[in-house]
Amino acid sequence: MAMASTDLDAFRREARTWIEANLERRTSRSAAVSAAEARTPEEIAQSRQLQRRLFDAGWAGISYPEDYGGRGLTEAHERVFNEESDQYLTPDFGAVGLVTFGPIGRSMLAHATPEFLQRHIPKMLAGEALWCQFYSEPEAGSDLAGIRTRATRDGDQWVIRGSKIWTTGAPNADYAMCLARTDWQATKHRGLTWFAVPMTAHGVSVRPIVLVDGNAGFCEETIDDVVVSDDDIIGRVNDGWSVAQTMLVYERRAGEGFSVAEPREIAPDLVSLARKANRLNDPIVRQAIARAHINDYAQHHLGKRLFAVLSTASSPNPAIAAYIKLAGGVLVPERVRLAMEIGGPDALAWDDDDSQGSQLAAEYLTGRIASIGGGTNEVQRNGIGERVLGLPREPSFDSRTPFADVVAASRNWNHRVG
Amino acid sequence: MDEAVTDDQRAVLDATSQFISKHCAITHLRRRAHDTEEFRRTYWKQAAELGWFSMLVPEFLGGGSASENGVLDAALIANKLGSALQPGPFVGTNVVAFAVSAAGTDAQKEMLLADLISGEASAAWAVDCRSGGALEAGVWATPTDFGYELRGFKSLVQDTAWATTILVTASSPSGPRQFLLPIDAPGISIQTRRSLDLTRSFAQVAFDRVPARSSHLLTDAVPTADLMDRQLAIACTLTAAQSVGTTAADLDMTVQYAKDRTAFGRPIGSFQAVKHLLVDSSLSLELGKATVIAAAEALGSNDDTALQAASMAKAFVGDTSIDIVQNCTQVFGGIGLTWEHDQHLYVRRVTTDASLYGDAVWHRERLCQLAGV
């Protein structure tokens, strides 16, 4: 393993030397990872090999602890490596990679036992174990703590039963980190526990969800009496919500990875669209192009600035990371609409061999993933309103009574409550 | 906007805040303390001691900044000024100090620059707002035997009563020319107009056959497009920085009101309809801060895209700052429409900033042109 260098410049030189000697240059710049875009089994297999190579040379898990196979350096070091390797072929697991090494790995480090970490993290960093989240449910989306999958004690084992949805990358995952209710008599947030579940476990079945653009990136699962043990618990029993809080922080920050480079060229996709539609001289179109580019630029610099504030301010408020998610949730849907306006008739019908037409349609139709997936705009607004601006919460109807009663009462809602 | 600054920048900003709250808080402005010559002279000299006018001038010319990037330092100060609705030609003085140090003649550097930095002098930067950022529009310079003769007028020249010098850009038969003139030069007449903004004043400056000698030209050489572009970019960045300060202060005041005011048995800020409006405003503000800092960093480091960045910041902040203060008025409800409440001062201020030196539409078109589209 290479020597640990903590000085960023020295680290950069060391990284560059290794990268140049060991990685292949990328031929075409691949687009930012779309959450809805799945990788093929061949791509995943290739990335696992690359990940293994990074792991063996000490470049996997740069900011993960050395005890579990990482490098034990800071996230700044990790960013330096990512910058240096930007033009090279690196492991690209798609969304499942972002989830594995971001929210899942980080929340495990914060909450799991050393034995658990010893068992799972080295395999994760070596590319042998990819993870997905069994989190949202058909009846629990924005109200994430309202999940109804149950884990029941059975001797020294647990039996999990329920259904999950909007799982990213499930077909490529080896394990799932699964949230289940372990105490129905506790209040909503108090009776939750996280379990590690092998995707191959008896009783787990996965079904892809076809989205509006015809592609399948997300899955839904049924969990039919899957048996796990105490060793598979992440965090403490009935304390799953604090693990979830950690996870959410990293989930919001995962958004930063989407725009590493500053957008320096004015919205090239929209300029090409306008040129094709012969509308580049139309003042309305020019305004739309400029508006989109300015928003892209503002969004990039927002992420950069908030990251600087989080890492240098004397007492940073971690809740400000939600601005990054909300910015995407507001600006992405606006951008795809601007693209449709610029495209005009060409955005509505196109020839078979016109990939720009079909891509535009797909982006338009899936633009709302940004404002719904991973926490809706409304949930982000509540979070920022309450935890950044310090505004008071709405009255709550589900935080003081046993969750079993909350479910029953919500079915008999009447407007004269309170 | 200043959550992540260096200790030196923090020192300048803290001193600036203290100075403002002691001498020129909104209560002073409402009494129109700044209407007297005496107040203006004292204010400007004390402000100069805080470094307000030295940031864009290199050290070897007597200037000096708080960090390696003087544009960012000036933008951070502008942000503070905006948050307290400060009067005075801060933008004009800094733009002119920049222009003189970048391209002025030795005599101008010697005579004017020291006075600008020390607060003995201040400068108006004369533009014609109706044409956005076409700096030369409105005034014509005709060559004469002794130099030039200037005719025409510039609209929306800020705080001329504070200024001792005016930098005016005129068209001449051989291209744009910039002149540095005493603001009381013969033939210059100033008509202060009633303005939407109550904290600053705006005048139409008329040039009636004003004789200008060659020594009044800003530079010995022909002014380059880049020199004028940079003046505009600095003016836009500082103005956007001020607007960000103004909207941040307004939003703070409004968020506090949403916590204090109760209706239907609860603080109004607990209603999502109000909370989400405030959060959306806050997001726009954060995005605006990010664009202004990015523009200041690009300008200060001579990045290739610096001019684009300045136009982007001006356009983004121009649009969103008006949205934000309008949302604030909505949250205040009736009280925000009264004369005695400060809310209208913020609305007046940012609406003016949004149009000065080119509005959002103009800067979006400029961005396309700068980007070669």
Image (spheres, rainbow, N blue to C red):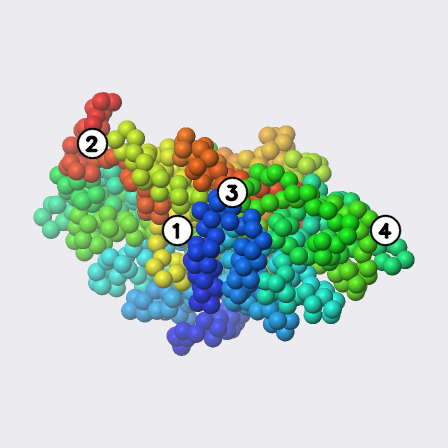
Tell me the element at label 2. Answer: helix
Nearer to us: label 4 or label 1: 4
Nearer to us: label 3 or label 2: 3
Other-residue count near label 3 (Cα within 10 Å), few / some / many at <14 / 14–19 / ≥20: many
Q: Name the residue under label 1.
A: A321
Q: Which residue is drawn at 73% across and 57% down?
A: B181
Q: Which chain carries label 3?
A: B
What label does residue B321 carry, if any? Answer: 3
User: What's the amino acid at mark 3?
Assistant: Ser
Q: Where in the figure is residue B92, as x and y percent of width and height?
A: 63, 54
Question: Would you say the residues marked 4 and 1 are in contact, meaning their CB atoms lie under 8 Å apart?
Answer: no
Q: Which chain carries label 2?
A: A
User: What's the amino acid at mark 1?
Assistant: Ala
Question: Would you say the residues marked 4 and 3 are in contact, meaning their CB atoms lie under 8 Å apart?
Answer: no
Q: Which chain carries label 1?
A: A
Q: Where in the figure is residue A340, as x and y percent of width and height?
A: 58, 34
Among the two numbered marks 4 and 3 on one chain, the one whose residue lies closer to the N terminus: 4
Q: Name the residue under label 2.
A: A407
Which quarter of the figure is the N terminus of chain A placed in? Answer: bottom left
